[in-house]
Each structure stands twice: as structure tokens, then as C-alpha cells.
Image: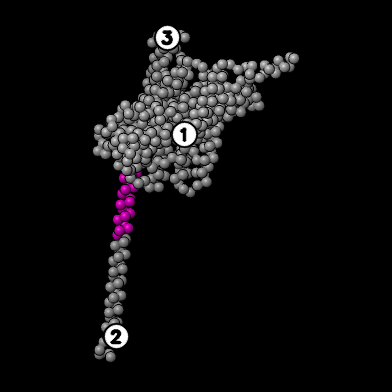
Amino acid sequence: MSELVTFLNSTGLFNIDWRDAIMMAVGLILVFLAITKQWEPYELLPIGLGILIVNLPLTGVAISPSESGGTQGAGIFGVIFHYGLSFWNILPPVIFLGIGALTDFGPLISNPKTLLLGAAAQVGIFVAFWGALGLNFFKEDIFSLGEAASIGIIGGADGPTTIFLSANLAPDILGITAVIAYTYMAAVPFIQPPIMKLLTTKKERSIVMKPGREVSKTEKMIFPIIALIIILLVVPKAAPLISMLVVGNLFKESGVVPRLTSAASNELLNIATILLMLTVGTQLQADLVFRLETVLILVLGLVAFAAGTTGGILFAKFMNLFLKDKINPLIGSAGVSAVPMAARISHHMGQQENPNNFLLHHALGPNVAGVIGSAVVAGVFLSLIG
Amino acid sequence: MKFGSIGAISETLINQSLIITAIGAGTTVCLLITLMISSFLMGWISKKLISRNSKIAQDNHLDTSDKNRALAAVIAAYILKYSNDSYDVNKV
């Protein structure tokens, strides 16, 4: 009889908490959204499954080697989290390698002015950074400097960069910042359009931009090398992200290593995505989520996205005061990375006003600039806080 | 929940955050402006190279045409000379 009691006590059914049940429901909602609505399915499906698995009681899948006192006592996701993120932090750079192999710098090189829009959209990072620090005014020591930086970087709308920085500066809130970043990236079609409409006139949204010049293959190879040297000479801490981005891109643009390009943009990227997203999901355990801090990060993340979008659009309008060939301010919102979703939103919004307006190519410039910009800001945060 | 006063944020933290913001924003803007200038320069050089290459190609094309014309003239003169010889009434 005592064995039966012991067995029953060891089951999840007897140990489930209402908070676990809610988190399992959250995981299932993400799975549902990924499958039925196809919202960032490559991210939200594994994250949702990770949340579901980790909140099933007593599975121990998220116990890290440092907590278990030995590798064998650690859970599978704890091991991946430990070696892939908190201890070595290799997964975000591997994802950047794949992103590099898929990135085309052509739109950026053909219209270099769009780099400024990528810079302007980073304002969201600093707004959220100060918002997080400002909350200390109401509740003492709610967010440290490192945590404020990790929350701020959500405004960069770049998942791997958010994870990279959080793993370094605030591993305790890594799961939350990562999930919020990806959730808001998936929600870009709902967050950005109202702000874009509010800040632009119909006439501005109808601006047709001149097609960019043709960019040679040589230029596409020289630009990333120049960017690599210039950025890393100033912000060496951004090396894991920027160098991998450039390596992946040169694989592609050189055209001499098609197998490596294919491996980086397919197999490697897919493997890293599976491991990273599942692990991020498993960081969302009930006891970490049901806290005031989580709700505040959720709000700050939204503020960061909105501020970044606003910054990009307003700066595009400001640039138009001086430019002969006007730029459509809608492409300013694409400065908040979220590649290529934000660029697509700019394109669709432009087509709603003028069906013959093709903004996608133009919007990819600030979009890629946003990736570089947020990686630079992450590097600066690491240099000064890490 | 313990709510603090304005003193809950230390002056050191504020100063440090201001410095981080200034350096972070400043570095990002400066780096992206540097990249923008590099891209403009690259585009300018690329345009120059393209126009120079096309000019050289055009010159080469002209040289080839001139050579062809000269060769044609020589051949024509040669043919005429020998054709005149063949129809020289004195020789017949």
C-alpha cells in the first residue's frame, strides 16, 4: 500500500499546480496559433511545445547540469540551455550564420540612406531600457541595469540578439524576454499598422520611390567585409553576432561554396532553431512567469516595439524635408528588424494606398540595417554592463 | 509590495544609464553613418569603374572598326591592283 502511495505521489497528477495548468494552456495556445494562424510557426510551435513540456510536473527536463550536481541528473533541455546558451551561448550566433546566408545586402547598398532608418528605429531599445530603469522609482530594485538592457533589446525585434544579450546579462529573465520578443515579432502585423497609419498621411503613404540602382556582385561581397571590420574595430563584443552574419553572407555572395551556403541556411539554421526555441520555451516555468516583473516586461516590450516603429517613421518624414527624391515613410517602420515581416507590412500598407507601389525592395534596406543596428547596441550593452 | 521614493533610483545608476544610452545610441548612429558613407563611396567607385570600362570597351570597339576598315581598304586596293593587271589591254 505504501508503494502505491509513493507511486501516486510521484505522478504529475498529484503534483500539478493551478499555475502549471495555466502555463500548459499558454503553451497550447501558442501551438494553436502557430498551426492554425501560421504566426511565426518556426518559432512559436517549438516554444509552445517547450512551455507545455516543462510545465508538466516533475519531468525535470529543464534541470541544468549546475543544479543537478552532475550531468546525468540534468534534464535534456537543461543541458541544451546550459551549453547552448548560458555557459557557451553558441546558438544565437549559429542562427546569425544562417540568417547571413539568407540575407541580401543589395537593397541596402543600392539605397544607403536607409541605414539611417535602421539607426532611428533603435530608439525603441533605449525607451524600454529607461522604462525598465524608471520602474525602480516605484519599486526598489525591480530591474537591474543588465535586466533593463535585456528588456530594452526586445525593441530591436531580433530574437537571436535578445537571447544572446539576455543569456549574458540576465539569464534569469532569458525565457521571458525571448518569448516576448518572438511573440511581438509574430504580432508585428497587428502592432505596426495602426501606428503607421496614425503617423503618416495618405499622400505620404502613396509616395512611389525610384527603383534602386543595380548592385554588382563585387559590391555585395565588399560591403559585409567593410561592415565587419568597421563594426568590430569599434564594438568587439558584437563579434559573435556580426562575424557570423558576415561569414554566412559571404558564403552566399561568393558563390564558390554552395554546399556551405546550403548547410548554413538550411540544416544548421534548422537544427539551431529547434534547439533554441524548444529550450527558450522550457525557460517559461510557472514559478518564473507568475510574477509582477513578467507583466511589466510584457508591457515594456510592447512599448519598445511601438517606440521603434515610431522612431523609424518619424525619421523618414524628417529625412523627406531635405531629400529631392522623397522616401515613403512607411519603410521607416521596417527599421525594427523583424526580418522580413516588418518589410512586408510596409509593402502591404503602401499597396493599400497605391496598388502599383512596390515598397518591399526599399523596405528591406532599413530592415537589414535594423539587424546590424540592434547587434551593435547589444555589443555596446555587453561592453559597458557585462 | 514596497514602493520607494525618488531616492529608490540611485544617482550612480542614473548617471551610468545616461552614459550607456549616450555611448550606445551614439556608437550605433556613427557606425551606421560610416557604413552609409562607405556604401555611397562604393557606389560612386562602382559607377566610375563601369563608365570607364564601357569607355575602354567603346574605344576598343572603335579601334577594331578602324583596323577592319584599313584592312578592307588594303584588300580592296590589292584586288583592284591585280584586277587592273588582269585587264591590262597592253598585256593582252
Q: Nearer the viewer, residue A87 or A16?
A: A16
The kind of secondary structure the magenta stretch mainly shows is: helix
Classify mark 1: helix, strand or loop.
Answer: helix
Name the secondary structure under disc 2.
helix
Residue that numbered label 1 is attached to: A241
Rounded to the nearest angstrom, the CA distance separating label 2 from label 1 is 83 Å
At 33% from the left edge and 54% from the top edge, which residue is drawn?
B53
Q: Residue at x 53, y 38 (%)?
A: A268
- Left or right placement of residue A254 versus residue B73 in this view: right
Residue A102 in the image: above or below residue B84: above
The amino acid type found where label 1 is placed reads Leu
Query: What span is colored magenta in the figure?
Result: B40-59
Q: Secondary structure at mark 3?
A: loop
- Res B30 label: none
Picture quarter with the C terminus of chain B: bottom left
Q: Chain of mark 1?
A: A
For label 1, the crowd category at 10 Å Cα-Cα, with few meaning under 14, some 14 to 19 and many 20 or more, is many
Question: Residue at label 3?
Answer: B4
Marked residue chain, label 3? B
- Residue B86 bears which disc, if any? 2
Q: Amino acid at mark 2?
A: Ser
Q: CA distance from mark 1 to mark 3?
A: 39 Å
On the picture, is A59 further left or further right than B81?
A: right
